[in-house]
């Protein structure tokens, strides 16, 4: 009888030990699962906040497309402005807080800075912020804008966007887009074709053909002349205005050298010399070089 009681006592102890170990394992696993679930919800909230912040950026980008000079979200009041992001199936998912500021030069808005802070309704503790700057396309971003057919020879290394309203024979290299406003054009002997042949808007032996695009909308050269009066006014108010001048020796114009420190050297041209040169599309003709003296 005593031996049987001893065996039962040992069994009870072993059961208690195993139950304790099992309980410890279960509690550890449960704690890990709950921790991972919490981390997962936090990651989801952070990702949602990021997407909501991006939605805020996209919203104000759309708003600027319709109201390019309005930096106050149509309210007439300073920001920040709240943009509620909704799920078509689940209702409101969060809010983007948007701050907008403009970068002004010569009296006009040159670019718009948008700061959007997103937070998810699932957990407002986690916020994500995005920043974007938007500006209208400028002719200054182009390396060349041409209004006629053009041939870029194999010795040309073109850096930056290259556009022509006519056709382009591209035998050089390019590190950016080469665009033509025509789908096809007639390549003549002036462009190295004999006999004449109909070719694509951009064609040739250049190595950057992956960046060739055609047809694209024409560049409006007429719009440049319309803007000249506005540019004259801005130069008079905010910059350097070089007035026209008369006289047999002083009517050749100006020569400008743009410097890397943001300043410009201005020279008045006082003499020109005629040179025999080649103009693509027109053939050989006289062009002029010039001599100049320092003005400013």
Image: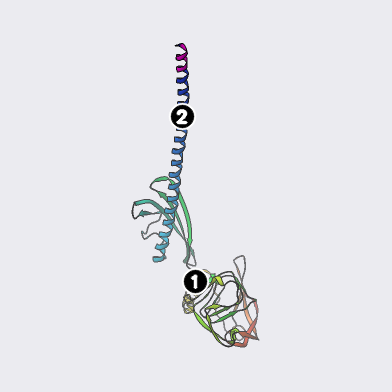
Apparent side of residue 73 relative to residue 164 in the rendered image (left or right): left
Q: Residue most toward the top?
A: 2
Residue 230 percent across, percent down from the top left:
47, 74
Sequence order check, earlier mark of 1 and 2? 2
Location of the C terminus (image quadrant): bottom right
Residue 86 percent across, percent down from the top left:
36, 54
At mark 2, the secondary structure is helix
Residue 147 percent across, percent down from the top left:
52, 80
Q: Name the residue that disc number 2 marks.
A: 22
Q: Name the residue that disc number 1 marks.
A: 234
- Depth check, front residue: 261 or 1: 1
Q: Which mark is residue 44?
A: none
Nearer the viewer's eye, disc 1 or disc 2? 2
The quadrant where residue 85 appears: bottom left
The quadrant where residue 282 appears: bottom right
Per the model, the C-alpha gap separating discs 1 and 2 is: 82 Å
Question: Residue visible at 42% across and 59% down?
Answer: 58
Apparent side of residue 163 relative to residue 75 in the rendered image (left or right): right
- Magenta stretch secondary structure, dominant: helix
Location of the N terminus (image quadrant): top left
Vertical comparison of 156 with 101: above or below: below
At mark 1, the secondary structure is helix
Apparent side of residue 246 relative to residue 17 in the rendered image (left or right): right
Vertical comparison of 269 with 12: above or below: below
- Depth check, front residue: 15 or 170: 15
**Magenta span has 20?**
no
Instruction: Write down the region rendered in magenta.
Output: 2-8
**Magenta span has 5?**
yes
Vertical comparison of 101 with 5: above or below: below
Question: Residue visible at 40% across and 49% down?
Answer: 120
Residue 193 percent across, percent down from the top left:
59, 85
């Amino acid at each position: 009888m005593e031996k049987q009681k001893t065996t039962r006592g040992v069994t009870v102890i072993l059961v208690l030990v195993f139950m304790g170990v099992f309980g410890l394992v279960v509690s550890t696993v449960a704690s890990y699962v709950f921790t991972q679930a919490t981390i997962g919800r936090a990651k989801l909230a952070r990702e949602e906040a990021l997407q909501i912040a991006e939605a805020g950026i996209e919203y104000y980008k759309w708003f600027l497309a319709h109201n390019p000079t309005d930096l106050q979200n149509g309210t007439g009041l300073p920001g920040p402005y709240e943009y509620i992001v909704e799920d078509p199936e689940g209702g409101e998912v969060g809010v983007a807080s948007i701050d907008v500021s403009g970068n002004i030069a010569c009296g006009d808005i040159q670019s718009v800075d948008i700061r959007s802070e997103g937070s998810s309704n699932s957990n407002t503790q986690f916020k994500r912020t995005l920043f974007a700057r938007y500006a209208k396309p400028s002719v200054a971003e182009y390396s060349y804008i041409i209004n006629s057919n053009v041939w870029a020879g194999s010795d040309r290394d073109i850096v930056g966007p290259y556009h022509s309203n006519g056709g382009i024979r591209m035998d050089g290299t390019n590190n950016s887009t080469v665009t033509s406003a025509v789908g096809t054009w007639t390549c003549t002997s002036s462009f190295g074709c004999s006999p004449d042949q109909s070719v694509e808007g951009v064609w040739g032996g250049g190595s950057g053909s992956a960046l060739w695009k055609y047809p694209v909308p024409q560049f409006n050269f007429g719009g440049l002349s319309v803007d000249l009066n506005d540019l004259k006014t801005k130069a008079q108010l905010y910059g350097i205005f070089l007035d026209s001048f008369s006289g047999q020796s002083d009517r050749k114009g100006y020569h400008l050298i743009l410097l890397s420190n943001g300043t410009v050297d201005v020279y008045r041209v006082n003499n020109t010399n005629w040179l025999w040169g080649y103009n693509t599309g027109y053939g050989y003709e006289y062009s002029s070089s010039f001599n100049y003296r320092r003005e400013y």
